[in-house]
Image: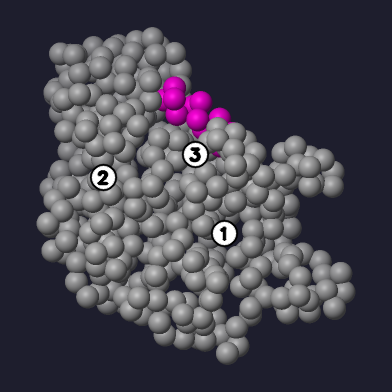
Amino acid sequence: MLVNVAEMQLISQNPSPKKGENMKFNSKLIHAGYDSDANSEGSITVPIYKTTAYQFNNTEHAANLFGLKEFGNIYSRLGNPTVGALEARLTDLEEGAMCVALSSGTSAVMYSLINIMSQGDNFVTANQLYGGTYTMFDNILPEYGINAKKVDITDFKAVEDAIDEKTRAIYCETITNPGLVVADVTTLSEIAHSKGIPLIVDATFTTSAIQKSFDFGADIIVYSLTKWMSGHGRVIAGAVIEKGGFDWGNGNFPLYDKPDTSYGGMRWGHDLGDLSNVAYSLRLRTVPLRNLGANMSPETAFEVMSGLETLGLRMDRHCENALKAAEYLSNHELVEWIRFPGLKDDPAYDLSEKYLKGTGGTMVVFGIKGGKDAGQKFIDNLKMFRHVANVGDTRSLAIHPATTTHSQLDDEQLVAAGSPPELVRLSIGIEDIEDIIEDLSQALESTK
């Protein structure tokens, strides 16, 4: 079998030291994945390695790398020391087995699925999804013969009934964007595992600070690191993290059973031996990433790690402010309805207690009296809130999804996706809560 075993072993062993493994969460945010004591220059932050490839000392050194006699870097599309440090940190934070960092959250979603699916396969997913993900699932993947079966993710019978012999995964967001439906990860994972398939969760809206999705049974975590994980609104980035231990050779994944001609005849579910624990991540790196190329730049990895250092502190403040903003809006005469899982009368309150550490999260959505026109007027009159197509920034952000992030959907699809025309989405920042509420107040008054 013509398999580059050296390369396979190289990418399975993160070259960055894993200092911080035994630390608590907030300490890991700062120290995990990189050991400054081991850096020859003594840099306390991870250096940015701006290089395409890595010099071999001589022909013997090159042969040793490819012959599994020693480990080292070969080419930056497969691995880079700065990106590797981020991958090690994310793996440690989630207490998973392996991480692959990618150029965007959208790439992470796409790769997480095509890594186990081919033409004729399908997956079961929530009908409420981020607009870009909805379009990917509704328009793009079907062009390649991969179909998304959209169901109400809270209807467990519908979820189970949608699974057939061609279903390769259940996919959901831990909190839907923008409807704020909290996924019952434990129940969904139990359904998935009873069918021998994984549960893939997009945990962008929760982060590892308020939900450890692996603890509830998820097998794969997808992130847009662009959002709260970095928090500063300066980079686009994504990641796919594997829990480890799922049996990819159980017969449900043809891509893992048949010889892979793109990688020397490797049967990913059967030929990895001790590395079978991370077969999914190894294939993701050496097939989609290696050949399609959505790799993360070292500069981006550095920026994400800089943001990660304050994730715990920021999420505490985001969640605290979001609750207070939601309480204010819930009592306002110009608000038709409100969704925030941390409110006691919210349909997702009990799930928030279980899955969100009782915080309710960081997002607030509401329907404004006056419908779509009032929603647009509210947005246009905000002063401190930034009107942008993003969430998870330190700043408070607002948008009207029906005319922006979900504008590709018709009215029926908008409702199905949890984004009716009157909905306003707020990503609550870490400013002083008095200023947040003042801005909300004056913008609401402008709609009268």
Q: Is residue 355 left or right of residue 181?
A: right
Residue 148 visible to the viewer? no
Q: Position of residue 350 (x, y in %)?
A: 21, 33
Q: Quadrant of residue 6?
A: bottom right
Q: Is residue 148 left or right of residue 61?
A: left
Q: Amino acid at mark 2?
A: Ala
Nearest the viewer among 402 and 219 is 219
| Residue that protrudes farthest toward the right in the picture | 58
The secondary structure type at the circle numbered 3 is loop
The secondary structure type at the circle numbered 1 is loop
Residue drawn at x 26%, y 45% as measured from the top left = 183
Q: CA distance from mark 2 to mark 3?
A: 20 Å
Q: Give the residue number, with chain letter if any, for mark 2.
A: 183
Q: Reading the chain from its start, which is encountered first: label 3 or label 1? A: 3
Crowd rating for badge 2 (residues with CA inside 10 Å; few <14, some 14–19, many 20+)? many
Q: Give the residue number, with chain letter if any, for mark 3.
A: 229
Q: Position of residue 188 (x, y in %)?
A: 25, 53
Nearest the viewer among 389 and 341 is 341
Nearest the viewer among 129 and 373 is 129
Which segment is the magenta one?
306-318
Q: Specify the label residue 47 is tagged with.
A: none
Q: Give the residue number, with chain letter if any, for mark 1.
A: 295
Q: Is residue 165 left or right of residue 294?
A: left
Q: Which image quarter holds the C terminus?
A: top left
Q: Which image quarter holds the N terminus?
A: bottom right
The secondary structure type at the circle numbered 2 is loop
Crowd rating for badge 1 (residues with CA inside 10 Å; few <14, some 14–19, many 20+)? many
